């Protein structure tokens, strides 16, 4: 009986333990269902209002593109039929910024849409799109590069084509283009400072050959084309930004123009200047800027490039014809070449150039009053006339004529294009006969009654390049 009672007592206990084990398994499975991520069914930022934030120059993003509802603005401008979309947003400060958007997928046809706004999710308008690879279900990368002013922007990552399934976005990255030398932003040199606002927001230090960084300074690049042999680069940092500047002649080399060594002569919120000399007119030069501590700052500085404009004080010339020389006096002439010196828009043939004087050979005839001009804003206060070349004299009566013997007068009139004067003469034999004569100004010949024979009348014309 005792054994039987023990057996009966154990049965309920075993049954209870099995039930408890079942409940534990059920609770564990329930927890797995509740807390397991569902990447394939929840899209990243299904609407503008839910757009996932991404930072220029920050970490790349990734996710699942799964919304089947296409929100405005609808995709356009690039090939593709809508299937799925996901929204991202970023803000530009310290603009304009030249940025590149790069997205990558391995399982769908990827379409990128860049959207501007007037405010958060308001005034949305497509400003660029990309779908260079229109193949379905393939690994592909799409990029958009744009220069953007300050404001809120959106990126729609869209799956297009024929596959009505979610798309895996492997990466979405925003980078500034001018944090590498080859992406340098172009500046124009002026005779006075015309500042351009710059930022180091989104910049990454690429520690390029010949630059002024060691790998942590997050520099940006600018470039200008020399219009003089000397230029001055001025960078004015805001409070909290201590600018360092340097120059390269070419990306990827250590070659610097004279004066282009890294400069950090002032401190926080101060002005740095760099004077570059011996430059080649027409060549591009690269300028690198960063904060000494590597700060990424919006509207961190202004930059301008200036040069001294040539000034014309006056000029003299040996004549007003082609191949005559004109001597131009003034200042700031160093480095000027023949193609820089123009008379009425036509460059001179050759020059001898000094800092304060240019001796130029006139290249071509003109028929008007012209200004002598040099690069920049330099032009002469007075005009200079370059006369056209002289034409060949032609007699109105032709090259030959006849008359009967007897006294009388005949005027032989000639013309020559662009002449400044005509002079007539009679051959010596005719003049030697008593009574024969010629008016050198009009070409009128007086013949004596007894003269017979051949007379030669010659006309000489004066003007540019007379022979």
Image (cartoon, rainbow, N blue to C red):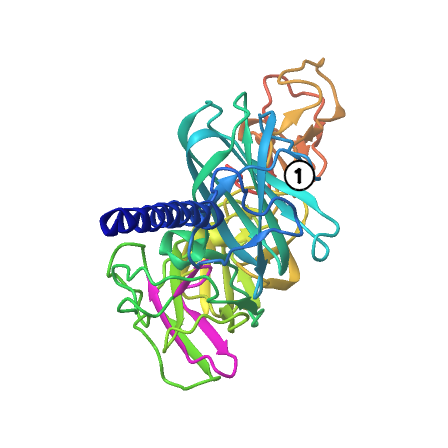
Which residue is disc 1 drawn over? 440
Q: Position of residue 30 (x, y in %)?
A: 46, 46
User: Would you say residue 245 sits in the magenta stretch?
Assistant: yes
Q: Position of residue 67 (x, y in %)?
A: 60, 37
Residue 14 position (above or below residue 57): above
Residue 311 position (above or below residue 33): below
Residue closest to the eye, 274 or 108: 108
Residue 354 visible here: no
User: Would you say residue 29 sits in the magenta stretch?
Assistant: no
Q: Position of residue 177 (x, y in %)?
A: 44, 53
Residue 119 is left or right of residue 188, and the answer is: right
How many numbered tags mark residues here?
A: 1
Q: Position of residue 261 (x, y in %)?
A: 30, 72
Residue closest to the eye, 361 or 127: 127
Figure quadrant of residue 316: bottom right
Q: Residue at x 32, y 51 (%)?
A: 9
Figure quadrant of residue 399: top right
Figure quadrant of residue 406: top right
Residue 451 is left or right of residue 212, and the answer is: right
Question: Of all residues shown, which one is farthest toward the bottom?
Answer: 267
Residue 414 is left or right of residue 255, and the answer is: right
Residue closest to the eye, 435 or 395: 395
Q: Residue at x 36, y 56 (%)?
A: 181
Question: Of all residues shown, which one is farthest toward the front?
Answer: 1
Q: Main secondary structure of the magenta part?
A: strand
For the magenta stretch, what is the residue range? 219-248
Residue 181 is left or right of residue 371, and the answer is: left
């Amino acid at each position: 009986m005792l054994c039987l009672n023990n057996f009966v007592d154990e049965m309920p206990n075993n049954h209870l333990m099995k039930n408890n084990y079942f409940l534990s398994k059920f609770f564990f499975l329930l927890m797995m269902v509740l807390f397991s991520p569902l990447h394939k069914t929840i899209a990243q930022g299904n609407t503008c209002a839910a757009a996932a934030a991404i930072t220029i120059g920050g970490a790349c993003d990734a996710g699942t593109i799964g919304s089947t509802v296409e929100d405005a603005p609808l995709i356009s401008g690039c090939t593709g039929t809508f299937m799925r979309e996901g929204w991202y947003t970023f803000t530009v400060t310290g603009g304009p910024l030249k940025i590149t958007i790069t997205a990558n997928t391995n399982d769908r046809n990827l379409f990128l849409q860049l959207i501007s706004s007037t405010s958060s999710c308001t005034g949305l308008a497509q400003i660029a799109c990309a779908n260079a690879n229109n193949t379905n279900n393939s690994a592909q990368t799409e990029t958009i590069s744009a220069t953007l002013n300050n404001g809120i922007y959106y990126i729609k990552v869209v799956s297009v084509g024929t596959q009505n399934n979610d798309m895996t976005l492997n990466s979405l990255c925003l980078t500034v283009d001018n944090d590498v030398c080859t992406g340098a932003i172009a500046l124009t040199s002026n005779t006075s400072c015309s500042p351009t606002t710059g930022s180091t927001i989104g910049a990454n230090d690429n520690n390029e050959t010949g630059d002024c960084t060691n790998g942590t300074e997050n520099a940006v690049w600018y470039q200008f084309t020399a219009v003089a042999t000397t230029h001055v680069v001025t960078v004015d940092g805001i409070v909290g930004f201590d600018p360092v500047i340097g120059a390269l002649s070419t990306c990827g080399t250590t070659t610097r123009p004279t004066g282009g060594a890294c400069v950090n002569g002032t401190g926080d919120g101060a002005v740095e200047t760099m004077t570059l000399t011996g430059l080649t007119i027409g060549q591009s030069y690269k300028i690198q800027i960063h904060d000494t501590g590597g700060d990424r700052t919006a509207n961190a500085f202004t930059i301008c490039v200036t040069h001294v404009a040539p000034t014309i004080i006056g000029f003299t010339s040996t004549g007003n014809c082609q191949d005559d020389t004109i001597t131009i006096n003034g200042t700031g002439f160093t480095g000027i070449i023949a193609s820089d010196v123009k008379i009425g828009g036509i460059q001179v043939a050759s020059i001898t150039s000094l800092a304060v004087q240019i001796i130029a050979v006139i290249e071509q005839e003109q028929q008007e009053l012209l200004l002598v001009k040099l690069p920049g804003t330099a032009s002469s206060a007075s005009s200079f006339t370059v006369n056209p070349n002289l034409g060949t004299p032609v007699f109105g009566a032709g090259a030959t004529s006849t008359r009967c013997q007897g006294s009388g007068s005949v005027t032989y009139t000639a013309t020559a294009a662009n002449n400044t004067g005509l002079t007539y003469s009679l051959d010596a034999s005719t003049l030697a006969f008593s009574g024969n004569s010629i008016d050198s100004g009009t070409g009128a010949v007086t013949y004596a009654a007894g003269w017979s024979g051949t007379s030669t009348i010659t006309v000489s014309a004066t003007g540019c390049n007379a022979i």
